Structures are given as structure tokens and as C-alpha cells.
Image: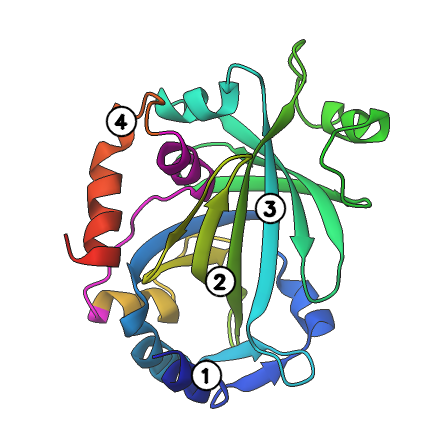
Amino acid sequence: MLHQLKDKLHLLDPISLDELSVCKLLNRIDTKYICNVKYLPEIIERARKDFKIQTSKANRIFGYESLYFDTPGLQTYFDHHQGKRIRYKVRFRKYIDTGDAFLEVKKKKNYTRTDKKRNQFEFSSTLEHQHEKFLRNHIKVPKTGFEPTIWTLFDRITLAGKNQLERITIDTNIRFKDKNHEISLPGLSIIEVKRDKAVGISPFSQILRDLNIRPYGFSKYIMGNVLLNPNLKHNRFQKKIVTVNKICYGT
């Protein structure tokens, strides 16, 4: 399947990272989907008319690493578990191919709108004074502070609309790790459609709809925590675990 997918990716017109920068959409409408990777060659084939693909040299798939931070009591995890509409996540994200790293605050303002703030720093597994200063500009930092919790690792394909302000990310080879464990989700693909405004239906969303792939909320941070620590309270996410197992393993 991977060989077939790579062949399909080379059918799309390229777009450089500099050109893609106009499509950052840091304040945006997000819609997520999950599916088995076996659908990706067909999805890419259908997208070639309306989308370009991020390309650097000959590369069209790029590696990412994220280290998430939470309070000792996992406040950001439990804010999500309790269904709070306004919540945030804190992470360091590293782009494997370039070595660039950013500290990011990803704030969920409601069920669809996301506001992401970020600043470039040297990657760090601890939050120093300059990092906390950046965070305080965007969130109320808890008195307990933050500590590293889990890593997420994945490969990403990024598409940009030719005729509309829209960016698509397709993540595969998803893994999670903490101090003691590492878990992978073979066969899972996470697709995110990112748009400036929720007006009409995007060409990419229509492709997914035609393949009977429906919107499905998904958080790598939440799923990673649950899989790495099954004793963590996760009843709100039980249905998602069943769905992911079905996609990955057919069970």
C-alpha cells in the first residue's frame, strides 16, 4: 500500500514550504476524519485536480515529533474528558526533516474553531523561563506548572487547495511513547481539513463523503494517554477506542 500511495503522491503538483506559508490558518475551522490507510491512494487520486502537495527536494512525506506537557494532575487531559468547550494543549513540535522546533499553545474555542499560537525555540524536554513567559501571554499557567507527559510521532502529507484557502494534513505511522512504553497504531490515518471559514463544503470533504468517510473528532494526545495508561479514567473515550481498534485491526 505504501508503494502505491507514494506513486499517487507524485501525481499532484508540488508546492514549496514558502508557498504553503500563506495557508497557515492558525485561526481556523478544523474538521477531522479517521480511516484505514488503504483508502489513501484513492483519496489522493481524487484530490489531484484541486490540490497541490508540500514538497521538499524529492520528499512528499515528512516526519513529526510532538512532546506534550500537562500538569501533574493531567488538567488538560481531564478538561477534554469532562467535555469542556474551551480548553488548550501545550506541546513542543519538532519537524524531523529540518530540525525546526516550536512551542505551541493550541486552544479549542468551541467544537470547531481552533486558535494556535507558537514561537520558535530550541527543542527542550523541560519548560524554562522563556517558555513560560511565552505561555503566560496566551493562557493562565497553573500554579503547579507543566511537566512532560507523552510523545506523539507520525508521518505527514500536507495538501493545499489550488482554488480556495484550505489545507489538508494526512497523518500515518502514528506512535505514542512515554518513559516506559511505546505503542503504534498500524493502519490508522488521521485526516484534518483546515479552513479559514466554514462556508459550503470543501472539495476534499466531498471526496471523503463520497467514500463514506465521515467527520470524527480525534486527539492524538488523548488517545496516546489512554493507550499508554489504560488505568487512566477514559470512559468518555471508550467508543473511540473501539472505533480505532476496528480500523487498525478489524476487531
Magenta-highlighted residues: 210-229
Whether pointer 2 and pointer 1 mark residues with C-beta atoms closer than 8 Å, the reply is no
Q: Which residue is labeled 4 in the image? A: 236
The Cα atoms of the two marked residues, 4 and 3, are separated by 24 Å
**Residue 169, numbered label:** 2
User: Which of the two residues, 76 or 19, is positioned nearer the viewer here?
Assistant: 76
Is residue 225 shown in magenta? Answer: yes
User: Which of the two residues, 55 or 26, is positioned nearer the viewer here?
Assistant: 55
**Residue 66, numbered label:** 3
Mark sitting earlier along the chain (2/1): 1
Mark sitting earlier along the chain (4/3): 3
Q: Relative to 32, say whether 55 is above or below.
A: below
Tag 4: residue type? Arg
Mark sitting earlier along the chain (4/2): 2
Tag 3: residue type? Ser
Q: Relative to 218, say whether 139 is above or below.
A: above
Whether pointer 1 and pointer 4 mark residues with C-beta atoms closer than 8 Å, the reply is no
Residue drawn at x 68%, y 78% is: 56
Tag 2: residue type? Thr
Residue positioned most to the front: 180
Q: Is residue 184 left or right of residue 58?
A: left
Give the crowd class for mark 2: few <14, some 14-19, many >=20 residues within 10 Å.
some
Rendered location of residue 146, percent (x, y): 65, 22
Nearest to the eye among marks 4 and 2: give it: 4
Mark sitting earlier along the chain (2/3): 3
Q: Is residue 101 left or right of residue 236?
A: right
Nearest to the eye among marks 4 and 3: give it: 3
Is residue 36 shown in magenta? Answer: no
Residue drawn at x 69%, y 67% is: 97
Q: Is residue 39 left or right of residue 204?
A: left
Rendered location of residue 31, percent (x, y): 39, 51
